[in-house]
Image (cartoon, rainbow, N blue to C red):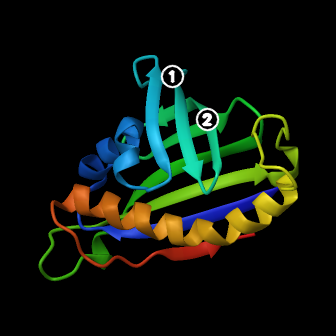
């Protein structure tokens, strides 16, 4: 299993941050590759989200299920189709890291644990002569750049204005 663990700081309390982290239907605003999110459920535990992704000549719909919500601390999820993957968004208070012009701060963590070799090769329509292993080798290095974009846009929404954010990579395959 591979693991990605990233974090960044938002200059708001966990109670102010969590609704943004929990609002999966807003995520297409944060990334260029997530085109649409559809929800089956009320957004709580057991809700299933169809995440329509597109990159290069590929498109794929990941189906993610919310497995637990402990507001304002965490929301856990797992993929329920084509790939063995699960993860968590976690928000922890970190007031000591707040800059002088902010009242408080919270650290936002994103964690994903996945087995890239568990992918169902039939789930993605690959162009002729393109293997799933090739796609995995091309996508994995792009994950950090994509994560930086997501975090920067998420923090801009949370704080109400864009700023440079620091993405801390705690673990990466």
Determine the residue located farthest toward the left in the rendered image: 101
Q: Residues within 10 Å of mark 2 (few under 14, many from 20)?
A: some
Q: Residue furthest front?
A: 128
Specify whether 77 is left or right of 126: left
Q: Position of residue 53 (x, y in %)?
A: 56, 44
On the image, numbered disc 2 is attached to which residue? 61
Residue found 88% across the figure and 51% down from its top? 117
In the displayed structure, 30 sits above or below 107; it is above
Q: Residue at x 61, y 73 (%)?
A: 170
Q: Foreground: 30 or 163?
A: 30
* Quarter placement of the C terminus: bottom right
Rendering coords of residue 99 (x, y %): 21, 81
Name which quarter of the figure residue 120 lies in: top right
How many tags in the picture? 2
> Residue 50's quadrant in the figure?
top right
Question: Of label 1 and label 2, which has the lower sequence position?
Answer: 1
When the figure is inspected, residue 162 is found, relative to residue 78, above or below; the finding is below
What's the residue at 25%, 63% (across, down)?
Answer: 156
Q: Could you tell whether 108 is left or right of 131 in the image?
A: left
Which element type, helix, strand or loop, lies under badge 1?
A: loop
Crowding at label 1, few (<14), some or many (≥20) Cα neighbours within 10 Å?
some
Dot in front, 1 or 2: 2
Residue 148: which disc? none
Q: Is residue 123 above or below residue 53?
A: above
Q: Which residue is mark 1?
A: 47
Q: Is residue 49 left or right of residue 163?
A: right
């Amino acid at each position: 299993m591979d693991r990605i663990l990233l974090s960044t700081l938002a200059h708001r309390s966990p109670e102010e941050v969590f609704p943004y982290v929990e609002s999966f239907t807003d995520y297409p605003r944060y990334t260029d590759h997530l085109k649409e999110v559809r929800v089956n459920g009320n957004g709580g535990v057991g809700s299933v989200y169809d995440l329509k992704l597109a990159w290069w000549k590929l498109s794929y719909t990941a189906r993610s299920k919310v497995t637990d919500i402990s507001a304002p601390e965490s929301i856990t999820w797992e993929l329920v189709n084509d790939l063995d993957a699960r993860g968590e968004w976690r928000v922890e208070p970190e007031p000591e890291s707040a800059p002088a012009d902010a009242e408080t701060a919270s650290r936002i963590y994103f964690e994903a644990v996945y087995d890239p070799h568990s992918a169902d090769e039939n789930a993605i329509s690959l162009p002729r002569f393109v293997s799933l292993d090739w796609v995995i080798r091309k996508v994995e290095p792009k994950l950090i750049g994509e994560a930086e974009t997501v975090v920067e846009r998420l923090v801009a929404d949370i704080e109400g204005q864009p700023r440079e954010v620091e993405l801390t990579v705690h673990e990466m395959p």
